[in-house]
Amino acid sequence: MIKLSKVLASGLIGACLAGAPPLWAQSSAAERRVELRFRDLGIDYPIRLRTVFGQASLPLNLRANELVTAAELELRIAHSPSLRFDLSHLSVAVNDQIVWTRPLDAAGASGKVVKIPLDPLLLVSRNQIRFDLVAHYAREGECEDPTHSTLWADISNDSVLRLTLRTLDLPPTLEKLPAPWFDAAERERLRLSFVLPPDPGLQTVRAAGIVAAWFGAQADYRGADFPVHFGLAPAGHAVLFQLGGTEPQLRAIRNPGDVDGRLLVFSAPDEAGLVELAQAFALGHLVMRGDAASLTRLELPPPQRAWASPRWPLLDQPIPLDAFRLGPSTVSGLAPGPITYEFTLPPDLYFLGRSGGWVDLHYRASRAGNPKSSLNVLLNGQYLGSTLLDAGGAQRAETDSRALEVELPPQHLRGRNRLVAQFEFTRDTAKACEDFRADTLQGGIDPRSRLKLARHAHYAEMPALEKLVNGGFPYAKFADLSQTAVLLPERPSAADISAALIVLGHIGRWTQEAATRVEVLGLAQVEDAADKDLLLIAPAEVATLPTAFDEAGVLRLGADGAELRTASSLAALQARIEGRPLRDAEKVAARVLVQSRGALGTLQQFESPLKRKRSVVALRTTGDFDPRAVALALTEPGRSQFIEGGLALVTADQVSGYRLGARYGVGRLPWWYALTRWMQHHPYLVVPLAIAFAWLFALVAQRLLRRHAASRLPKAG
């Protein structure tokens, strides 16, 4: 019997990663019905079951405060018409409990719909829905190939799971944080409202930013949206900041406007107390018992070093792959699933040679099966290398571990990487009717496997907004954001503050640390943040930038409109040499500006006019365009993929990025490499410089020779 086991996607209630959104229908005050297609759960393709025994599973996660009261599974199935139907059947199991089994028949081969009622008592917080295919085609006395192409069945990703959910009335508590404000069962973007006092001070905004970065770290890949309200809390869950009381205190209370909502309340006598309470919360220094926690004393840890967050591996030593493994490290069967590792690298990683490093895989594999069985290695979907599993032949013991070293091309390495080790077991078909057991085919990767990076430096060529999208750079370099300052108008609107919180949440996703040292300042205080990387949020209609900042970017925004500054002829020549279509990018950006008709959102990145090698990201809008839409574009994969270079334009219809703006470097390169790189980027200066150096050398040599000749002449008198 051959087992094909694949985890297809992480499904959950309310997930809507692709296609049409799930349908919601309110049935009562505390009960709702949910209809989810498999494509809503992240199943982008039909579930394909193959071989004599094909198996696939669909994870289903439920919120901790919801209970399933009714469930139904509607499957759209098609299968091979050439099966032996008296021996072939399909089964469905929920958490390893068989709930449905039916034989396959010729009438349903081209497709049929079956509705399967599910016992709601079987569904808990973490669930697995498994599909098992048992298929045969050979008649009595005939030999059967367990991997024959006849053995197949497909389950459409238009299949539907219907659930009736009841929200449990749980008492407010801090002990289950981040739930219910964020539940790890969710795969959709976190949407959590922040409620601030009317006309909040910038230190209150700073406290909210620290908390937003913490929730952004919890949401991770899902992204986070933080709408801001002044005064009253909206329906649902929310985070509320208020001034008052005798000491900083964190409380969990019911939302007065929503029986199912909960409020996470930060209160303190003054704004400084709010900041300290937010810092203690993010650092985990509060004792979370019951529904309240008080702050008595806070001592901040020292500022963090660059790239010290647990998100980033230590690069000056071999990286153990097992710490980044997803799923099991061993597989079996004729069609085993992959052994997968996910790891992140700093966005400013700059390799000083042609190699990005090496993967040193130590693996074990059984000798059963065909000698052509292999182990293949892929990085981010790109093939790196492979080896045959029969190396060593009969002389190799079953317990022996073997090594495979594969080189990593630097162009294939990204901020977030997926390394896959795929065993490919094949059956020896020389003897067609020989008894065969698929579970004897086994392979695994040893925990001592390592990733070794080649010689590198920390250097980034800027502007590069794509590094902000895929790594939070440059802000995430220091995980506590000690080198980051957020600049806002003196009286920011709710939308301005929301945009700042969304960006800080996005940065928190990458740092996975407490943003305890981030600063929030007014535009008039920009000189106080001269030695920091700046995040500037200022609508063009209500805020005027300092002249130096207004002139540093490639796009000038004002109440009278937008002006795109074109690059000089020398910069255009430099771009042509480097293969960048600078003039074409300017034309396209100008066309988008005209078509926006004054309603536009922009992201610009440029070198700080206050200090070299410091970056500024300016999030600005014109007309009535919502700055939140620009910030949210950073968190939406379908839109953020277009953000790059020094300028991104966001309209109601599209997001577009352009490699425009003056270029600068952040970080350090060895002097000899920096010189070589400079000559590669300025080849038109090599000949003039060579002539100048030759002339200078000739001039010095001439003077030295004349002095030497004069010293040999006899002195007069």
Image: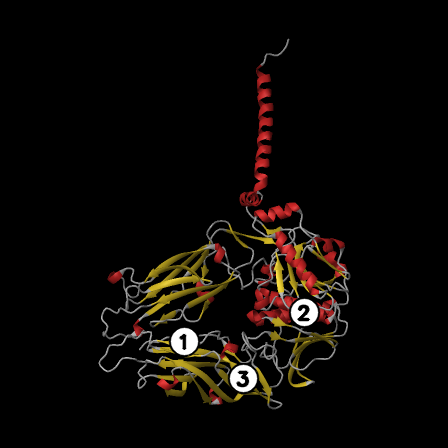
Nearer-N-terminus badge (3/2): 3
- Badge nearest the viewer, 3 or 2: 3
Residue 237 vs residue 582, the one in the foreground:
582
Left/right of residue 685 with respect to residue 371 in the rendered view: right
Nearer-N-terminus badge (3/1): 3
Reading the image, the residue beneath label 2 is 628
Marks 1 and 2: in contact by CB < 8 Å?
no
**Callout 1, which amino acid?**
Arg
Instruction: Tell me the crowding category of disc 2: few under 14, some 14 to 19, or many 20 or more residues within 10 angstroms, Cα based.
Output: many
Q: Which mark is residue 48?
A: 1
Residue 104 seen in this snapshot: no
The local secondary structure at tag 1 comes to strand
Residue 73 seen in this snapshot: yes
The local secondary structure at tag 3 comes to strand
Q: Residue at x 75, y 69 (%)?
A: 201
Q: Which mark is residue 35?
A: 3
Spatial CA distance of label 3 from label 2 is 30 Å
Nearer-N-terminus badge (2/1): 1
Instruction: Tell me the crowding category of disc 1: few under 14, some 14 to 19, or many 20 or more residues within 10 angstroms, Cα based.
Output: some
Residue 294 vs residue 208, the one in the foreground:
208
- Splitting the image into 4 quarters, where does residue 706 fall? top right
Spatial CA distance of label 3 from label 1 is 23 Å
The local secondary structure at tag 2 comes to helix
Residue 503 pos. (x, y %): 64, 66
**Callout 3, which amino acid?**
Glu
Instruction: Tell me the crowding category of disc 3: few under 14, some 14 to 19, or many 20 or more residues within 10 angstroms, Cα based.
Output: many
Spatial CA distance of label 2 from label 1 is 41 Å
Residue 237 pos. (x, y %): 64, 80
- Work out whether 270 lies above or below 545: below
Q: Residue at x 34, y 77 (%)?
A: 151
- Splitting the image into 4 quarters, where does residue 67 fall? bottom right
The furthest residue to the top:
717
